[in-house]
Amino acid sequence: MQQILDRVQAIILRPRETWPIIKDEPATTGELYRNYIMILAAVQTLSMFIGMWIFGGAIFHRVGLSFFQGIAWAVVHYLFTLASVYIAAKVVESLAPTFDAKKDFISALKVVAYSWTPAFVIAVVHIIPGLSILTILGLYGLYLFYIGLPYLMECPPEKALPYAALSIIISLVIYMILSIVPALMVGFPSMNGSF
């Protein structure tokens, strides 16, 4: 757990020194998911569930969800978040040749997973629903994504901004389309704070 906390702190506070370290670390998709993505996505989902059910119960009760439907929402939200990271990484990998970048899925997954760190971490404010506005601080991840692309995807620095912008736009459109699925599955609007 200390290793995750150290990485979270490093990527948020010292991204320019941390991206080269991340680039050189051997990793597989499974390792990235098990050792980082699944843990932070669980923190995010659990925080949102606690905030909406226990402390802001009116949110779930207002739409007529039982406790078990709330649990179902949390499970679907969690799975949806894990899928969103994977899809965003596929978008980054697919766009790589367009921006003279290296087409490598593991590098793309690293840049997505680690740049989403602020959104995953700041989600703990959902525990106290009145602080949810602070989730806007998760947008710092967009900056991390932009500066991470030249390191991990090896794109020319001058192409990092258009690469980042197009990746974000395409991922956002796909995300918005797919976010309908959790809402339809449990009858509650998708409240994913990870993007």
Image (cartoon, rainbow, N blue to C red):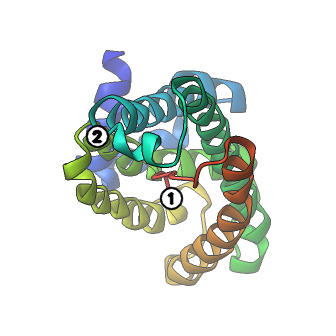
Of residue 140 and residue 76, the one placed in the foreground of this image is: 76
Return the residue at label 2: 10
Where is residue 56, by image quadrant?
top left
Return the residue at label 1: 195
Q: Amino acid at mark 2?
A: Ala
Q: Marks 2 and 1: CB-CB under 8 Å?
A: no
Q: Residues within 10 Å of mark 2 (few under 14, many from 20)?
A: some
User: In the rendering, at what x and y percent does residue 90 appear?
Assistant: 75, 56
Query: Image height check: is 158 above or below 187?
Result: below
Q: Amino acid at mark 1?
A: Phe
Q: Quadrant of the N terminus?
A: top left
Of residue 9 and residue 138, the one placed in the foreground of this image is: 138
Report whether residue 102 is seen: no
User: In the rendering, at what x and y percent does residue 142 appear?
Assistant: 42, 66
Query: Image height check: is 126 above or below 191?
Result: above
Of residue 134 and residue 100, the one placed in the foreground of this image is: 134
